[in-house]
């Protein structure tokens, strides 16, 4: 008997019923299984059952807000989390708090963009599991005191560990594999965020680069590792 491919399951945490229904309909059409939680506490409880491949999380929720839900899921699980924010200003807060979200979308979201992001985040998280054990000796990249150990997902500078988020780590590692190569924001978006054919939000790249730079460089104003090529993109040297 051929092995049944397990349907990917998405948890939607959203208190606005019409939005939740619209999301559920689109997920179903795209071949996903889904469940809906209408407040933060219910969302956390369902998420912690571990039965989901991705969690789509609204920020403004009754009982427990999305920030808290995200933080508490992340204490226990590595399931990809996409945050849905109603206001652009909240994006900075999401990025700044390091609550462990993998991605964000701003409302109202074009449904095809959202579905592309869901797909990309699920694929990336399942790829990580598959590819991790195949890393070998060349999994360590060294650039003048900066050591990226891909087998441990760890970065140190002069022996001191740097606390990077997942996106910062992925961005750094991607560029560090080809020092000197200039990557455009679109290339980085596609490589690290994985939105194939979607070129909407390269500001994510800029935000992550500046946060990465703040942690990576001794003096962010005079970078030693992560450089900007004006009008073209970024590179590691
Ligand atoms: Ca809401």
Image (cartoon, rainbow, N blue to C red):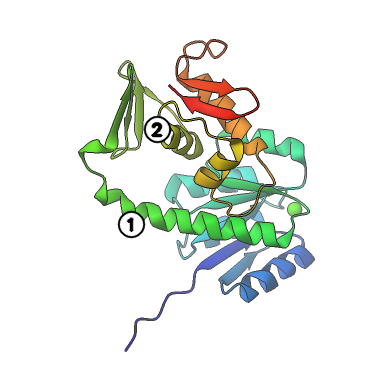
Image coords of residue 105 (percent x, y):
68, 49
Give the farthest residue toward the left. 137
Graded by Cα atoms within 10 Å as few (under 14), some (14 to 19) or many (20 or more), the crowding at tag 1 reads few
Q: Residue at x 58, y 35 (%)?
A: 184
- Quadrant containing the C terminus is top left
Rendered view: 84 above or below 5: above
Which image quarter: residue 142? top left
Graded by Cα atoms within 10 Å as few (under 14), some (14 to 19) or many (20 or more), the crowding at tag 2 reads few
Which sits in the foreground, 122 or 20? 122
**Left-right relation of 234 to 57:** left
Image coords of residue 128 (percent x, y):
38, 51
Would residue 82 be seen by someone viewing this image from the given angle? yes
Q: Secondary structure at mark 1?
A: helix
Q: Secondary structure at mark 2?
A: loop
Image coords of residue 109 (percent x, y):
74, 55
Residue labelled 2 has its Cβ within 8 Å of some atom of ligand 1? no
Q: Residue at x 68, y 70 (%)?
A: 26
**Left-right relation of 80 to 144:** right
According to the picture, the residue beneath numbered tag 1 turns out to be 130
Which image quarter: residue 135? top left
Rendered view: 2 above or below 157: below
**Left-right relation of 40 to 153:** right
Give the farthest residue toward the bottom. 1
Q: Residue at x 52, y 21 (%)?
A: 227
Which callout, 1 or 2, points at the residue further toward the start of the chain?
Answer: 1
Q: Residue at x 67, y 36 (%)?
A: 203
Which sits in the foreground, 27 or 140? 140
Rendered view: 218 above or below 106: above
The dot on residue 178 is 2
């Amino acid at each position: 008997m051929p092995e049944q491919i397990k349907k990917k399951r998405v948890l939607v945490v959203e208190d606005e019923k019409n939005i939740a229904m619209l999301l559920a309909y689109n997920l179903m059409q795209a071949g996903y299984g889904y469940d809906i939680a209408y407040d933060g506490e219910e969302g956390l409880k369902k998420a912690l059952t571990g039965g989901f491949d991705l969690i789509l999380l609204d920020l403004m929720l009754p009982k427990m807000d999305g920030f808290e839900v995200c933080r508490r899921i992340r204490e226990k699980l590595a399931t990809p989390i996409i945050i849905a924010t109603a206001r652009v200003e909240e994006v900075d807060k999401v990025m700044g708090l390091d609550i462990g979200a993998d991605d964000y979308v701003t409302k109202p979201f074009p449904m095809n963009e959202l579905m592309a992001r869901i797909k990309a985040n699920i694929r990336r998280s399942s790829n990580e599991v598959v590819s991790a054990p195949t890393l070998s000796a060349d999994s360590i990249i060294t650039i003048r005191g900066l050591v990226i150990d891909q087998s441990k997902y760890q970065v140190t500078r002069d022996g001191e560990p740097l606390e990077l988020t997942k996106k910062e780590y992925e961005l750094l590692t991607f560029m560090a594999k080809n020092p000197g190569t200039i990557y455009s924001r679109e290339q980085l978006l596609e490589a690290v965020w994985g939105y194939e054919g979607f070129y909407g939000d390269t500001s994510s790249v800029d935000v992550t680069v500046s946060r990465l730079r703040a942690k990576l460089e001794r003096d962010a104003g005079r970078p030693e590792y992560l450089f900007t090529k004006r009008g073209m993109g970024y590179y590691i040297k």
